[in-house]
Image (cartoon, grey):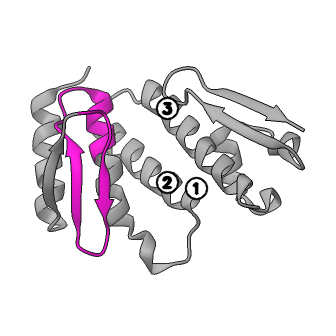
Amino acid sequence: MFNKDIAESYINKLLNHYKIKVVSWSKTDCGRAWITSKEVKIPKPTNLMRFCIALHEIGHIVEDATKSKMKLYQSEYKAEQFAIREAKSLGFDTTEYEKNARGYVTMCIAKGHARKLNLDKIEPHIKDFCGIDFETWKGKKVFVSNWRKELNIEIKN
């Protein structure tokens, strides 16, 4: 069961520990992280989804994707794993969030695919996380939509 007070306290603890500044509180279920300046725009953790989104953005800074040459999907995967791990550590059920996270990482892979990402180089653990047979995408145009609700993947020749 989600507990807003625990979530808010945990977000504040992470922000203080990692010296991350909130530049603004998002009014929607989205966020943004500026890794080098250690700043985030995150939603108030009023429900589990918003809490996990805040964790995701903090995860970008904690995992510091700028230290390597990660592709977008890899950076987003790492931030999603951080959010899921931290929420689970507090005993929260992340089932619904994980569904959204898989859709989001899949959408990032589709963006990369449109820009000639070599699908064979996607790490097996990320393929497993997404649960998608990326072989069916080869040589085709792929459109991913509705990743926050019921993932819709359209493959065209």
- Label 3 belongs to which residue? 100
Instruction: Locate residue 110, reporting x and y percent.
Output: 68, 47
Does the image show residue 43?
yes
- Looking at the figure, which quarter contains the N terminus? top left
Residue lying at 55% horizontally and 30% vertically, measured from the top left: 147
How far, Cα to Cα, is label 3 from label 1?
A: 14 Å
- Amino acid type of the residue that numbered disc 2 sits on in the rendered structure: Glu
Question: Can you identify the residue that label 2 sits on?
Answer: 76
Q: Position of residue 5 (x, y in %)?
A: 9, 32
User: What amino acid is labelled 3 in the image?
Assistant: Asn
Percent position (x, y) of residue 51? 26, 37
* Left or right: 103, with 43 as reference point: right
Under tag 1, what secondary structure?
helix
Q: Amino acid at mark 1?
A: Tyr
Q: Label 1 belongs to which residue?
A: 73
| Frontmost residue, 141 versus 39 | 141
Which of the 4 quarters of the picture holds residue 128? top right
Horizontal side of residue 78 vs 91, given as left or right: right
Region in magenta = 28-54
Instruction: Give coordinates of residue 153: x percent, y percent.
Output: 71, 30
Quick one: SS at disc 3? helix
Q: Is residue 44 magenta?
A: yes
Magenta highlight on residue 116: no
Residue 91 in sight here: no
Q: CA distance from mark 2 to mark 3?
A: 12 Å
Image mark count: 3
Determine crowd level at label 3: few under 14, some 14-19, many 20+ residues with C-alpha closer than 10 A. Answer: many
CB atoms of marks 1 and 2 within 8 Å: yes
